């Protein structure tokens, strides 16, 4: 089953953060990974965000690969991703705060999932060029389930 992930970083060595995240995903979750190039984007900010957040540009990429453990549920996969984020230095912070790494599940095969805490395809992905451009780069024919 093909899984598509969006990755972003806007703290620290952003490129290295993304490389390390891909390495963890490749080691434990996905085989035959294909990777987009790196894409820069301005952060999405909530109202009243600290002014310094506006200048903290993201590096983004999309990866896709085959699920290593077909018995793994989407919730189990999400928990692994969250554990990877913590291992890479992500700290608890307000929503949309700057972060060392952010990993989102964009697609889970051809499934549509709408559960508390887990919506796949990612509900905002089609509005975000920093997701769609790298996705089209690696999977030009991909269509929403």
Image: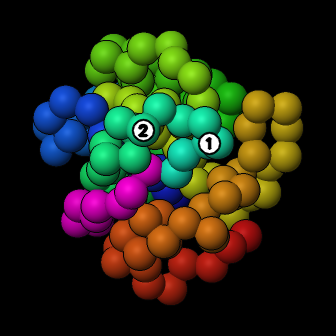
Give above or below for 144 relative to 123.
Answer: below
Residue at 49% across, 56% down: 4
Give above or below for 141 relative to 42.
Answer: below
Number of residues whose C-alpha sits closer than 10 Å to that of mark 1, classed few (under 14), some (14–19) or many (20 or more): few
Distance between mark 1 and mark 2 Cα atoms: 11 Å
Mark 2 residue element:
helix
Q: Residue beneath label 1, please? A: 46
Q: Position of residue 122 (x, y in %)?
A: 66, 54
Number of residues whose C-alpha sits closer than 10 Å to that of mark 2, classed few (under 14), some (14–19) or many (20 or more): few
| The quadrant where residue 70 appears | top right
Mark 1 / mark 2, whichever is N-terminal: 1
Give above or below for 46 relative to 136.
Answer: above
Q: Nearer the viewer, residue 33 or 58?
A: 58
Residue 51 shown in magenta: no
Q: Which quarter of the image is occupied by the N terminus?
A: bottom right
Residue at 64% across, 42% down: 47
The stretch of residues the image draws in magenta is 34-43
What label sits on residue 51 in the rendered view? 2
Position of 23 compared to 46: left or right? left
Q: Nearer the viewer, mark 1 or mark 2?
A: 2
């Amino acid at each position: 089953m093909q899984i598509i992930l969006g990755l972003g970083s806007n703290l620290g060595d952003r490129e290295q953060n993304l490389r390390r995240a891909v390495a963890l995903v490749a080691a434990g979750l996905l085989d035959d990974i294909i990777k987009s190039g790196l894409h820069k984007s301005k952060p999405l900010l909530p109202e009243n965000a600290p002014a310094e957040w506006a200048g903290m540009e993201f590096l983004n990429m999309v990866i896709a690969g085959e699920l290593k453990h077909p018995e793994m549920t989407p919730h189990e996969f999400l928990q692994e991703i969250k554990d990877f984020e913590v291992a890479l230095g992500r700290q608890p912070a307000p929503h949309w705060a700057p972060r060392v790494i952010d990993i989102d599940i964009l697609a889970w095969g051809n499934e549509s999932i709408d559960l508390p805490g887990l919506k796949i395809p990612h509900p905002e992905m089609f509005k975000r060029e920093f997701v769609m451009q790298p996705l089209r780069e690696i999977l030009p024919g991909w269509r929403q389930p």
